[in-house]
Image (tube, rainbow, N blue to C red):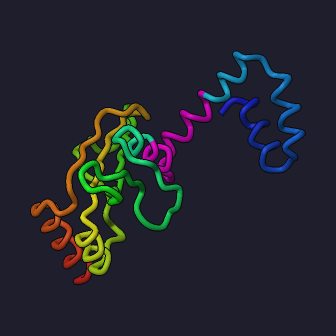
């Protein structure tokens, strides 16, 4: 992280809006661009947060992003049924070149899944968006219905295995 971005983050989190504005007004266009690029690079590659990767996956797939951490990641209006919405859940994966990270395989993380959530999601008939990134660059988005039989069967198998352990 460059020192200018570190200063902006410090002022943002400990100062006032006026202090931040005054600090940023004095920066050159090139300096502001460099700070924004550093911030985006850091945020999209963050191993502990997939928020920005979820946002880009959902919006590029034509859904409206839900900011809430509770519930589904996005929704869109059903083109065939007036007033009905289609919900989606995004599963993103970002790998880093030059490390021993796993390869992109179209998979997603369902480690916190429960039988109750599976029942709810089957009833809701949402769509799953799986996306793959390499070093923060989007490579693919795959969309499929949650109720795809082989997908549901795989989730049921994982839940039974986790319940056993």
Up-down relation of residue 68 to residue 93 (above or below): below
| Quadrant in the picture for the N terminus | top right
Q: Residue furthest front?
A: 82
- Residue 126, position in %: x, y? 28, 60
Name the residue rendered at 12%, 68% in the picture: 153
Q: In this view, does 148 lie to the left or right of 41?
A: left
The residue lying toward the viewer, choosing from 113 and 164, is 113
Quadrant of the rendered structure where residue 85 is? bottom left
Q: Which quarter shows the C terminus?
A: bottom left
The secondary structure that dominates the magenta segment is helix
The magenta region covers: 37-55
Front in this rendered view, residue 81 or 65: 81
Q: Is residue 139 above or below residue 75?
A: above
The question of residue 146 being in magenta is answered with no
Asked if the stretch drawn in magenta spans residue 52, the answer is yes
- In the picture provided, is 70 more to the left or to the right than 7? left
User: For residue 5, what is the image quadrant?
Assistant: top right
115 sits to left or right of 1: left
- Residue appearing at x 50%, y 52% in the figure: 49
Residue at 16% x, 66% y is 152
| Residue 37: percent from left, percent from top | 59, 27
Measuring 77% from the left and 37% from the top, which residue is drawn there? 8
Where is residue 12 drawn, in percent x and y?
Answer: 78, 44
Front in this rendered view, residue 15 or 163: 15
99 sits to left or right of 9: left
């Amino acid at each position: 992280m460059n020192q200018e971005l570190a200063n902006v983050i410090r002022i943002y989190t400990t100062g006032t809006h006026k202090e931040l504005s005054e600090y940023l007004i004095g920066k050159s266009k090139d300096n502001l661009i460099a700070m924004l690029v550093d911030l985006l690079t850091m945020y999209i590659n963050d191993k502990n947060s997939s928020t920005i990767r979820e946002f880009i996956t959902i919006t590029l797939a034509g859904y409206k992003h839900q900011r809430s951490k509770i519930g589904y990641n996005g929704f869109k209006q059903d083109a065939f049924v007036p007033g009905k919405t289609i919900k989606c859940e995004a599963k993103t994966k970002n790998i880093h070149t030059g490390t021993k990270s796993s390869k992109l395989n179209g998979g997603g993380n369902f480690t916190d899944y429960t039988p109750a959530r599976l029942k709810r999601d089957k009833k809701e008939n949402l769509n799953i968006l799986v996306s793959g990134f390499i070093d923060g660059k989007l490579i693919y988005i795959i969309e499929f219905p949650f109720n795809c039989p082989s997908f549901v069967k795989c989730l049921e198998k994982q839940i039974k295995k986790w319940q056993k352990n």
